[in-house]
Amino acid sequence: MADWRTRSLWLSRKPYEPAPPLDGDLDVDVVIVGGGFTGLWTAIHLKHADPSVDVAVLEQRVAGYGASGRNGGFAMTMVGRNLHDLVRKAGPARARATRLAMRSTLREIAAFVRDEGIDADLTRPGLLTVSNGPEQDERIRQDLEASQRLGLDDLRYLSGPECRALVAGDRIRCGHFEEDALLVDPAALTRGLRDAAVRLGVRVFESTPVHSLALPRTHVLARTPGGDVRADRALLATNAYAHAVPALRRWLFTIVASIVVTEPLTGEQWKRVGWEGGAGVEDKRIMPHFHRPTPDGRILWGGRDAPFAPGGPDPRQDRSPLVFRRLEETFRWTFPQLGDVRIDRGWCGPVAGTVNCFAHAGRLGRGRRVVYALGYAGHGVGPSHLTAKIARDLLLDRDGGLLDLPMAAKRPVPLPPGPLRALVLNGSQRVLQRADDGDRGPLTGLALRFLE
C-alpha cells in the first residue's frame, strides 16, 4: 500500500491520510465498489437526492489510485471520440442533449469544488484542439460543422497563427477552441470528493478490496477481508478493474495510458512557448497527444501509445521506459525551443475502453440489484460526474431525464472471446498507430474510413 504515492505526480503532490479499512460486518442501502470519480460522485448524488440513503464506498487501495488519480486532469465535454463521432453514433438530437448536459456538468463540477472548498487547483482556461497534419485539418472541420448543425456555439475556429498565439507550437496548422473545459489536479479532486461524501454521511473504507459480490435472492453481499457488507443495491465503479467481472469483460477492454512531465520551467523558458492563458491542448491524432501546464510550473505531456492489456490492470505496466521515450520524442518535435528542458518523470495507468468509445451505465445480474458505470476511454474526469447521475437514477429506480443519453441508451458492442479478442485489439492498435505516423496503406485507409 505504501507505493500509491509513486503512481503519479498528482498522487504525490499533496499530503493525504487514507481512511481506515472496513473492520466488521455492515448493513447499508447501497454499497459502492470503487473509490474513484464515478463511485464518489454517485455517492454524493445519492445523498443529495435522498439524505436518508445509507451508502458505503469500498476502495481496494486509496481514493483515486486508478485512472482518477493518474490522468491529465482535463475535464472536457467530450463523449465518444469527438463531437462529429458523437453525432454519427448517437444521432443529432441525442448528441445535442449530451453536449448540453456535459456543458452543465462542467459548471456543476466547478461550483461544487468552490462551494465545498476543495483545493484541486481547478481553473477554466478552455481547451485548444489542434491539427498537425492535413487529415487532422479535416477532423477539425468535421467538429466545427457538427457544432453548427446542432445549433451550438461552443467551438470557435482558430487559424494557425491564432492557435500559436495561445501556445507557440510551430507544427500547429489550425484548431478550434472551447471555453467550457476545466483543468484540475485529479487526485486532489478525488480526495476532496471523498471528504465531501463523508460530510454527507457516506462511509468510506480504503484498503478494502472486495473479493466477491454475491447475489442472494433479497440482497447483495460484498465480501472483504475485514467483513461482509450487506446491501439492497450495489454499484460497480471500478472502471478498468472491472476486467475481473466476466459479464463486463465481454465488451470492456483495458489499455495502458502514459504521461510524462517536465521539470519546472523557468520564466524565460515559459516565454518561449507563450501559454499565458494556460489552456489545455489536445491534437487530432486518432490516438491523441494532450498537454497542459501543471500548477507547479511543469508541462504535462501524454497520449500516443496505449498498449492493450489482455489480463486487465497490472502494476508491472505502471512504468514503460519505451513509451516514455516515444512521448519525449513528440514533445521535442512539438517544442524544439525547449531543448534544454528535462523530462522529470513518467507514469502509466489502466484505462477502460469500449468499442464505441462511450462510457456506459446499466444493470447486471438477476433482481436488477447491481449497477455498473465505467468505460471512459481516458476522458472520464468530466463525464464521470454525468454518468454517476445515471447510476444514481438506476440505483433509485427512477428516470431523471438522463436515461436517453448514449451512456445509458447505447448498448456496448461485445468483443470476440479468447485469443481472437487480443488479435483484434492488438491489430487495430498497430493499424491506428501507423495511420497516426503517416502510413497510408490499404489497411490504414480502411480504418480511417471506418472512424471518420
Image: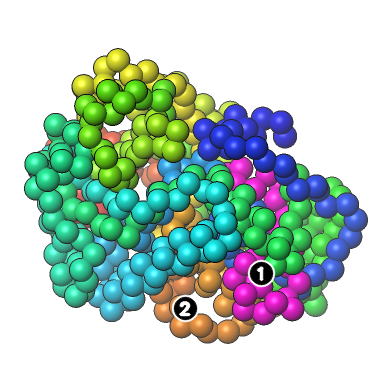
Q: Is residue 428 left or right of residue 70?
A: left
User: Which residue lies under the disc numbered 2?
Assistant: 403
Classify residue 433 as left or right of residue 62: left
For image coordinates 74% across by 67% down, the residue present is 201
Along the line of sight, the residue nearer the viewer: 38 or 375: 38
Corner quadrant of residue 62: top right
Q: Which residues are magenta?
A: 43-68
The amino acid type of the residue labelled 1 equals Val
Q: Nearer the viewer, residue 405 or 364?
A: 405
State yes or no: residue 60 in magenta: yes
Q: Label 2: state its secondary structure.
A: loop
Q: Residue furthest front?
A: 267
Left-right relation of 91 to 4: left
47 to 228, vertically: above or below: below
106 above or below 49? above
Badge 1 element: strand
For this view, does 124 lie left or right of residue 228?
Answer: left
Residue closer to the observer: 426 or 219: 219
Residue at position x 57%, y 56% in the image: 117
Residue receiving disc 1: 370
Residue 212: percent from left, percent from top: 76, 55
Q: Position of residue 386 (x, y in %)?
A: 47, 67
